[in-house]
Structures are given as structure tokens and as C-alpha cells.
Amino acid sequence: MAESAEAALLGGAGMLAVAAATEAFELRQSQPEVPILTMGALTGAELDVALQARSELTVWSEGFFETLAQSASMLGFTPRVHVKYDSGMGRLGSRDAPEVTELIERCEADERVELAGLWTHFATADEDDDAFLRQQLDAFLALAAPLRESHPGLRLHAANSAATLRGEEFHLDMVRCGVAIYGLDPFGKDARAQGLEPALSLHSYVADVKRFGPGDSAGYGRTWVAEAETSVGVLPIGYGDGVRRGLSNRAVVLVGGGRRPLAGTISMDNVTVDLGPESSFAPGEPAVLIGRQGDEEVSAEEWARLLETINYEITCGISPRVPRVYQR
């Protein structure tokens, strides 16, 4: 998180956002001055942690506002707050515009907090049909316009990565890019077509090479059986590292600049790869599971399509036991 935050700031970000109080507290250790917004719901104990981190906070209900104001006064800190409006996402925030307006006025009038922003979140910005996206934007602007007149310093924000890439009409006062800052395509297609460069690659190596004859099998359940003579490479990485079991016998690994199919069920700690009958690879050969090798590439989007999910889930699923190496 600290390295990602530093990269975002070097790239021009003026503020950082996190989901949880513990994230805000950890981030504050490496970024003592940068504004941090905690966007998620908080228990009373989590609220105290976020306040100790001097985080800006989301207010989504009258009840949480009162809890926040009381905690802030006890800690002697006046937090900046961003009121959440549910324009159609169906998560935190009221759908009732007059209720949100009342909460804005309450925050403005209470000296225990400082009103900073009004925000919403788009549910369908990554879909081709933009009817609901525009419905949400219209609803938000209808609420925000009069409030902006009475509160000129109110910062309005709504755009996630997909909405940011769709156009400036969604940008308002600031954007909240998530998946795009990691170089992943929020539309789940081709990151480079959006001008994005994937920041992550996932590497392993061939730990052993075994000769297989017809009828030899690899992995639990014998889901892959060699039809002819071939070589099989064993890579010490598996679903315990984030290589999802659903990729078994479907995904490829890059070895020697070529696409080598996974052979057999993915284990917790190992995968097996069909290297081909003419393979001359030896143990120690580099392997790439996500990223580029030579002229070939395996993207997070490719894995996501195979698993019928999104690229963000793929990268979030890489477990903490995988060593991270950062390049600047």
C-alpha cells in the first residue's frame, strides 16, 4: 500500500482513499501529511482508529454522524467529512435527496466536524449501455447543484476508473481511480487500448522437468493425462498464492517466450505445465503467469475471462505470501 500510494502521488494524485480504518492508520505512517479519505463503513472502534489517523471520513446516515461527532470531540480532532448519496448503487447512503440535504446542513452547522464533500458511486460505468450511468449522474447533479450554491467549498466526486475514462462530464471536482491506476482495464478488455500499462506481473520458475509417456497423469484427480510423449514442468506456485483452481487445464504460462498450457488440477503450492515433446527446458527456467515474456503476454483480463470474473478480483487474490518486488 505504501508503495502504491507513493506512486499515485508521484503521478499527480492530490489525495488518497482507502476502504478501512486500519488502512488509513497504516498509510498515515508513510504519508504523514497527505489527505486521506476513508470511504467504508466503520464500527465505533474502527472510527477511533480512523480519527487517530486524521482521516477524512464518509457520513452516510444521521446515526453515524452523531457517533462520529461525539468521538471526534472526545479526541479533540475536527474531521473533514464527505456525505454519501445513494444515486443507484444500493450501498451506503440515503436514496432520499431531502434527507441527504438535511444531513449536509447538519454537518455544516456542527462545529465538531468540517463539511468537505458530497459523493456518490456509479454502478454501471463499465458497461456499454450508459442509460443508468446518466440517470445516476443526473440525480446526483440535481441534488448537488443547489447545495453547491449554498456551500461553495463543497467538493463533488462520483467517478470511478470507468467513468473517468468515459469523459470529463463525469469528473466533477475530483475522480477516484481505482483499477486503472494499476494499469488494468475497467472495461475488462484491453488495458493498452485505454492507454494503460499494467503495473503487475506474476513470476515463478520451473522447479523440475519430468518426461511423460502416453497415459501418465499430472495433479489431483488425474484431470490431465498425456496423449503422447511430452515434458511437464513443475512450478512452485498454486492457489495458495492466488493462481485460482478454476484455471486448471485452461490457462497458459509463458516459458521460453511461448504459451505453455497448464496440465492438471492446480494444487495449493504447485502447478504443472505441458512444455511439449521437444522441450529442452531445465530446472530454473523463468516462468511468467501474468505479464510479458518475449512477444507473448498473459493479462489479468485473460484470467478474468476464463474465470468469468473481473481483473480486479484476479490481482486482489494474489496472496500475501507472494513476495512483492517494486520497480520505480
Image (spheres, rainbow, N blue to C red):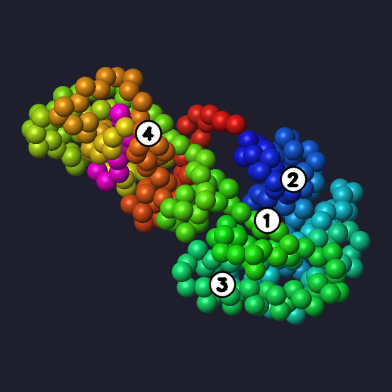
Residue 323: x and y in percent read 50, 29
Q: Which residues are magenta?
A: 249-256
Mark 1 in CB contact with mark 3 (< 8 angstroms)? no
Nearest-to-viewer mark from 2 and 1: 1
Residue 205 position, x and y percent, is: 35, 26
Residue at the image position 46 percent from the left and 69 percent from the top? 128
Q: CA distance from mark 3 to mark 2?
A: 34 Å
Q: How far is mark 2 from mark 1, CA to CA?
A: 14 Å
> Considering the image in quadrants, where does the N terminus appear?
top right
Label of residue 293 in the image: 4
Q: Secondary structure at mark 2?
A: helix
Q: Nearer the viewer, mark 2 or mark 4?
A: 4
Q: Residue 298: where, in percent of width, then height?
A: 37, 42
Mark 1 → mark 3, Cα distance in angstroms: 21 Å
On screen, residue 146 above or below 233: below
**Of the residues under marks 4 and 3, which one precedes in the sequence?**
3
Q: Residues within 10 Å of mark 1 (few under 14, many from 20)?
A: many
Q: Residue at x 23, y 37 (%)?
A: 263
- Crowding near the residue tagged with mark 3, few <14, some 14–19, many ≥20 C-alpha atoms within 10 Å: many
Mark 4: secondary structure: strand
Is 71 situated above or below 229?
A: below
